[in-house]
Amino acid sequence: MPYPSSTREVTATLKSHGISPTRQRVALGRLILSRPQHLTADALYDMARARNVQVSRATVYNTLRLFSTRGLLNEVVIDDNAKYFDSNLQPHQHLFNTATGELTDLDSNKLSVTGIPKLPRNAHIEGIDIVIRYSESAKR
Amino acid sequence: MPYPSSTREVTATLKSHGISPTRQRVALGRLILSRPQHLTADALYDMARARNVQVSRATVYNTLRLFSTRGLLNEVVIDDNAKYFDSNLQPHQHLFNTATGELTDLDSNKLSVTGIPKLPRNAHIEGIDIVIRYSESAKR
DNA sequence: GTCCTTGCAAAGTCTTTGCAACGTG
DNA sequence: CACGTTGCAAAGACTTTGCAAGGAC
């Protein structure tokens, strides 16, 4: 289920990842898993409250951590004060507008990296994080 | 002065970047600027105290921020709990051992990225951060 | 009913800041 | 001596956790 959005789809996704589908988790899952997006814990909390989802901040944090651990979300750290949870699980890279804080996805097959050095033979690459930071106009 | 190490060299480097060379700043500069390395604020604080450099934590934080602002250091954020200050100012990429937390440099001219999309014409790229995360052996 | 989850508040971690004392030129 | 810098402790931002109440199966 790529981007589960209905209660039923989210419930199924959670179960298939060994997560019991409580009311809060399903509600949060519907908000964050339903499409590719990047949200901070606080943004999700605000979004939930705006939709009258009754949930505490602690549960938002715990749920995001749980979802990440179980592979439903990826964490993206752009700078020290911007930790996002990314519902796009496909390999991809990020474009970060340093002026606005906007974070957008780059399609993985557009970019390629060559020249990755050999690692020790017992090492394996867990991931390659690429963030292109840019700003617009004469800003510096 | 690539990697200033003596008191005199560090003093000159600070001055040339508009930083008054106080005792604490010179001492910290000698510790972090003298060779390519990655240090956290806390690691630098500990290193300073180990060398009997009398400095407070607040000053270490303030100094690192100042050095970064003035272009003497780069910040590298690997994950949420690892913010390093990097004294290597050349373009380069990072190899991060997720098991040990070890961060090593990759020579820029070994790696190349192709397929960077066109950005709006008034945009300019501030930097491309590439971190290859890996771990060794069967760890997962 | 048992075990897991939630929410609150407290605790933790890391970093910045207010302010008086101090240092530097 | 004027101004910038330091150090302490307090404040802040963000995240985790202890624990009692509540919920799921």
Image: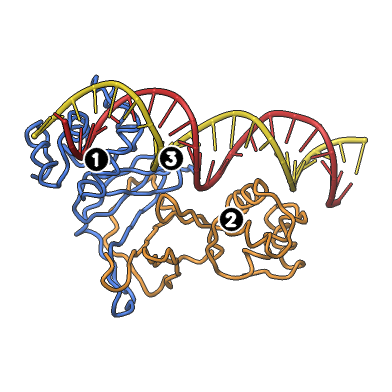
Chain colours: A orange, B blue, C yellow, D red
- Look at the image and tell me whether residue A63 can be seen: yes
Q: In the rendered structure, the residue with mark 3 lies on which chain?
A: B
- Look at the image and tell me whether residue B100 can be seen: no
Under tag 1, what secondary structure? loop
- Quarter-of-image position of residue A130: bottom left
Separation of marks 2 and 1 at Cα, in angstroms: 33 Å
Nearest to the eye among marks 1 and 3: give it.
1
Q: In the rendered structure, the residue with mark 2 lies on which chain?
A: A
Q: Position of residue C13 (x, y in %)?
A: 48, 34
Q: Is A37 drawn above or below residue A80 in the view shown?
A: below
Q: Position of residue B69 (x, y in %)?
A: 26, 49
Q: Residue at horizontal 12%, vertical 37%?
A: B10
Q: In the rendered structure, the residue with mark 1 lies on which chain?
A: B
Q: Nearer the viewer, residue D24 or C17?
A: C17
Task: Decide: few, some or many residues near mark 1? Use Cα within 10 Å; few <14, some 14-19, many ≥20.
Answer: some
Q: Residue at horizontal 29%, vertical 44%?
A: B104
Label 3 and label 2 in one chain: no
Separation of marks 1 and 3 at Cα, in angstroms: 19 Å
Q: Amino acid at mark 3?
A: Ala
Separation of marks 3 and 2 at Cα, in angstroms: 19 Å
Label disc, if present, on residue B37 of the rendered structure: 1
Under tag 2, what secondary structure? loop
Nearest to the eye among marks 2 and 1: give it.
1
Q: Nearer the viewer, residue A81 or B21?
A: B21
Task: Decide: few, some or many residues near mark 2? Use Cα within 10 Å; few <14, some 14-19, many ≥20.
Answer: few
Q: Is B44 drawn above or below residue A52 in the view shown?
A: above
Label disc, if present, on residue A71 of the rendered structure: 2
Which residue was labeled with disc 3?
Answer: B99
Q: Amino acid at mark 1?
A: Gln
